[in-house]
Image (cartoon, rainbow, N blue to C red):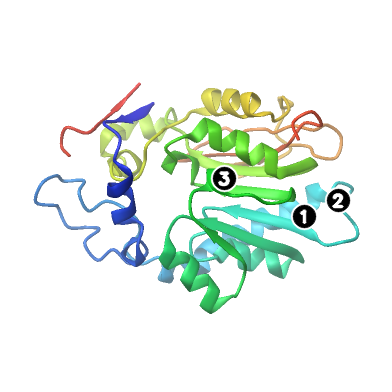
Amino acid sequence: MWLTPQPTQAELREIYSFDYFRNREFFNIGSESENENVYGYHDYFSERFIKQQDHQRIIGRLVQLGRGRFRTSGGRRFLDVGCGLGYLLDVAHDHGFDVEGIDCNPAAADWIAAKFRFPVFCGDFMAYEGHPFDAVAMLDVIEHLPRPFEALAKAASLVRPGGLFVLSTMDSDSLVSRVIGKRLEDFRRTREHLYFFNRRTIRAALERAGFESPPDRVLRAYDSVGFSDGASEAGFSLASARCRSAWCIGSVSQASGSTSTRVRR
């Protein structure tokens, strides 16, 4: 599914500012559309503790799956695409990764530079040039991107052979998505959510991008989070998402180095 018409680049740049992380109008009905103010976060700063609890779980599992995969010398490199205010980078750094972030929001890059001093590329992900990483994360980002399929291929090129990729996005076919429909917050974010995936379409998109075919089993699930068996068989695996997100971890293959706005299927 995709949003039509799509916002212009100028319209997207308008929302990706400091106000994206502290949107005081989030719960107010807009003058032109009831979804006009539904973007970003009411107060992202107050969510740091909760988000980093989840991040600890994700990075901890990533480290487990990386045993025998990640380099033992030269530092383990971690890239967060759509890094926001650096909460995930902070956790990954605490786990011993050399971290780097990418974000299109200048306010986010400035915040990280002042708060953490982690290197951040500010701009279009497709314009980023860097050396391959041991692990690349793209959490709740793919739905924001104007060219999601090209972005996945780009991500695959940035994961070194044998490295790991972790992705999250809403499951547009989940029970909650189908029951609540257009009232669901993710569908109401018509100023920022451009594409929507279900488990079948995200699996196909990942394979098309160069990630190896997954085993059918899920090694372990935490709520809606699933991880593949990275030790015995390369690939990604999707959990059966009980709520809004479908998660995967995958490894890149050796070969790949307005009110009128609506959602269409």
In depth, the one of 226 and 147 nearer the eye is 147
Q: Which of the two discs, 2 and 3, sits closer to the camera?
A: 2
Disc 2/disc 3 C-alpha distance (Å): 24 Å
Residue at 57% over, 47% down: 138
Task: Give the mark nearer the N terminus: 1 vs 3.
Answer: 1
Nearer to me, 178 or 160: 160
Q: Nearer the viewer, mark 1 or mark 3?
A: 1
Amino acid carrying mark 2 in the image: Arg
Judging by the rendered image, the residue that carries numbered circle 1 is 63
Can residue 80 be seen here? The reply is yes
Q: Earlier in the sequence, mark 2 or mark 3?
A: 2
How many marks do you count on the picture? 3
Do labels 1 and 2 touch, CB within 8 Å?
yes
Q: Position of residue 39 (x, y in %)?
A: 31, 52
Q: Is residue 239 left or right of residue 256?
A: left
Image: 119 above or below 207: below
Three-letter code, disc 1 = Val
- List x then y, in percent, for residue 158: 69, 44
- Residue 239 shows up from this direction: no
